[in-house]
C-alpha cells in the first residue's frame, strides 16, 4: 500500500504517456487483426490484395473492441470516483440492466436499429434516475450498489418474460445480443459510435480535475468552487449515454468497468487524473485481447464464444475479491 501512495505523489499522467499508450494499442491491434477463426495469419497474407475484405472486417471489429473497452473502463472509473466506491460499475449498479431492458423491448417489437438505440438510451437513463432516487431514501453507504443488484435481477426477470411473448427466432436473436458479443459493425455505424464515444470520454477528461475533488468530500469540493450535485449529475448523464450507446452494439459486456479502474488504482493510486486515461488505454487492450481470444477459440471449439462470458469469468472472481476486501475493513 505504501508503494501505491508513493507512486500517486510522484506520478502525473502526461501527453507523452498517452502517445506511448497509443503506440502500444496500435501494435496490439495489428497483432489482434492477425487472429482469425483459422488461427494466426501472416502479415503478408493479411495485407495481400485478395485479403482486403478480410482485413476490413477484422479492422472494424478491432476498432469496435477498442471503442467499447475504452468506454466501459472510463465509465467505471468515473462512477467509482464520484460514488467513492470501488465496486461501482455500470453493469453492477443497474445502468447496463436498464439499457438491456429498454433495448430488449425495442428489439422484440421492432427490427430497426434506431429503435434499439433509443430504447437502450431511455432504459439506461431511466434506471439511473430510479436508482439515484431510491438510494437517496436509504442510509446505507452502498445503497446504490445494492439497489442496482436488485434491479438487475428485476430487469432479467422482465427480459425472461419478454422471451415468452416473441417468436423462437426473436428469442435466439435476443439471447445472442444479451450475452455480449463484438461483431462486425457497418462502417457508418462504427464511425458514428467511435466519434460519439470519443467526445464523451474527452468530456470526462476535461472535467477530471473537478471529479477528483469529489474524493475529498462534498464540503471540501464546494469550498474549492465545485458544485458536487451538478457535477455528479453531468457525470451520471455522460455514463448513461456511453452505456446506452454501447449496449445496442455489443449487448451486455460486464465487469470491464470494475476490474480495469481497480487494477489501475492499485498501481497509480487514487488520483482520478491518472486513473481515467490509464483506464481508457488498459480497457482498450483488455477487451481487444478478450475478443481476439474468443476468435481464436473457434480453432478448437468450432464455435465463437461470447466475449461477455469471458469478461464475466474474469470479472466475477475479481468482484468477489474486491467485495471481501472492502467489507473486511481494508482501504
Image (cartoon, rainbow, N blue to C red):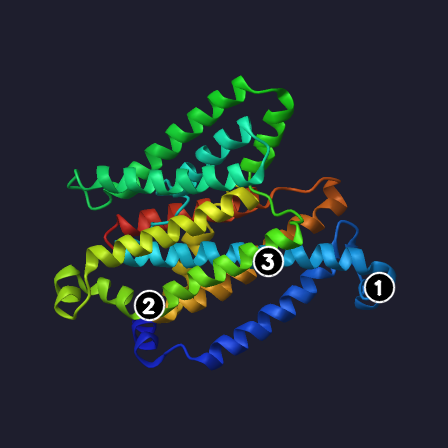
Pinpoint residue 261: horizontal percent, then vertical percent. 40, 60
How far is mark 1 from mark 2, CA to CA?
A: 43 Å
First in sequence: mark 3 vs mark 1: 1
Q: Residue at x 32, y 51 (%)?
A: 236
Q: In which quarter of the image is the N terminus?
A: bottom left
**Crowd band around label 1 with a 10 angstrom C-alpha radius: few (<14), some (14–19), many (20+):** few
Q: Which residue is drawn at 40% across and 77% down?
A: 13
Question: Mark 2 packing: few (<14 Cα in 10 Å), some, or many (20+)?
Answer: some
Residue 281 in the image: above or below residue 38:
below
Q: Which of 91 and 323 is in front in this view?
A: 91
- Given residues 221 and 319, the one toward you in this image is 221
- Residue at 41 percent of width and 30 percent of height: 155
Circle number at residue 45: 1
Q: Is residue 321 left or right of residue 231?
A: right
Quadrant in the rendering for residue 201: bottom left
Label 3 to label 1, Cα distance in Å? 26 Å
- When the figure is inspected, residue 135 is found, relative to residue 87, above or below; the finding is above
Q: Foreground mark, 3 or 2?
A: 3
Q: Earlier in the sequence, mark 1 or mark 2?
A: 1
With respect to residue 260, does 162 lie above or below?
Answer: above
Between marks 3 and 1 in the image, the one whose residue lies nearer the viewer: 3
Q: Mark 2 points at which residue?
A: 208
Within-10-Å neighbours for mark 3: few <14, some 14–19, many 20+: some
Q: Which structural element holds mark 1? A: helix
Whether the residues at callouts 1 and 2 have beta carbons within 8 Å, the answer is: no
The residue that disc 3 covers is 191
Amino acid at each position: 500500500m505504501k508503494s501505491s501512495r508513493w507512486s500517486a505523489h510522484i506520478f502525473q499522467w502526461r501527453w507523452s504517456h498517452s502517445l506511448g499508450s497509443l503506440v502500444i494499442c496500435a501494435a496490439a491491434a495489428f497483432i489482434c487483426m492477425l487472429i482469425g477463426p483459422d488461427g494466426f495469419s501472416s502479415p503478408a497474407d493479411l495485407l495481400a490484395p485478395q485479403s482486403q475484405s478480410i482485413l476490413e472486417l477484422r479492422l472494424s471489429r478491432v476498432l469496435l473492441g477498442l471503442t467499447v473497452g475504452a468506454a466501459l473502463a472510463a465509465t467505471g472509473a468515473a462512477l467509482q470516483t464520484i460514488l467513492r466506491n470501488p465496486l461501482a460499475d455500470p453493469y453492477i449498479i443497474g445502468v447496463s440492466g436498464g439499457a438491456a431492458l429498454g433495448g430488449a423491448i425495442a428489439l422484440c417489437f421492432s427490427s430497426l436499429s434506431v429503435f434499439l438505440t433509443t430504447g437502450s438510451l431511455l432504459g439506461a437513463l431511466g434506471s439511473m434516475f430510479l436508482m439515484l432516487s431510491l438510494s437517496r431514501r436509504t442510509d446505507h453507504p452502498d445503497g446504490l450498489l445494492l439497489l442496482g443488484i436488485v434491479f438487475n435481477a428485476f430487469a432479467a426477470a422482465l427480459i425472461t418474460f419478454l422471451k415468452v411473448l416473441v417468436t423462437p427466432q426473436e428469442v435466439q436473436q435476443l439471447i445472442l445480443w444479451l450475452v455480449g458479443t463484438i461483431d462486425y459493425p457497418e462502417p457508418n455505424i462504427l464511425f458514428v459510435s467511435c466519434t460519439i464515444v470519443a467526445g464523451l470520454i474527452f468530456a470526462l477528461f476535461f472535467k477530471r480535475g473537478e471529479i477528483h475533488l469529489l474524493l475529498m468530500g462534498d464540503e471540501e469540493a464546494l469550498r474549492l468552487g465545485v458544485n458536487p450535485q451538478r457535477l455528479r449529475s453531468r457525470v451520471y448523464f455522460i455514463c448513461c449515454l456511453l452505456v446506452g450507446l454501447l449496449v445496442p452494439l455489443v449487448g451486455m459486456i460486464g465487469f470491464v468497468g470494475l476490474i480495469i479502474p481497480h487494477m489501475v488504482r492499485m498501481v497509480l493510486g487514487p488520483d482520478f487524473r491518472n486513473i481515467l486515461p490509464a483506464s481508457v488505454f488498459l480497457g482498450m487492450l483488455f477487451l481487444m485481447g478478450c475478443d481476439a481470444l474468443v476468435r481464436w477459440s473457434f480453432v478448437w471449439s468450432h464455435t465463437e464464444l461470447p466475449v461477455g462470458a469471458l469478461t464475466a469469468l474474469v470479472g466475477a472472481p475479481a468482484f468477489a475479491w474486491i467485495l471481501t476486501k472492502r467489507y473486511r475493513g481494508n482501504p
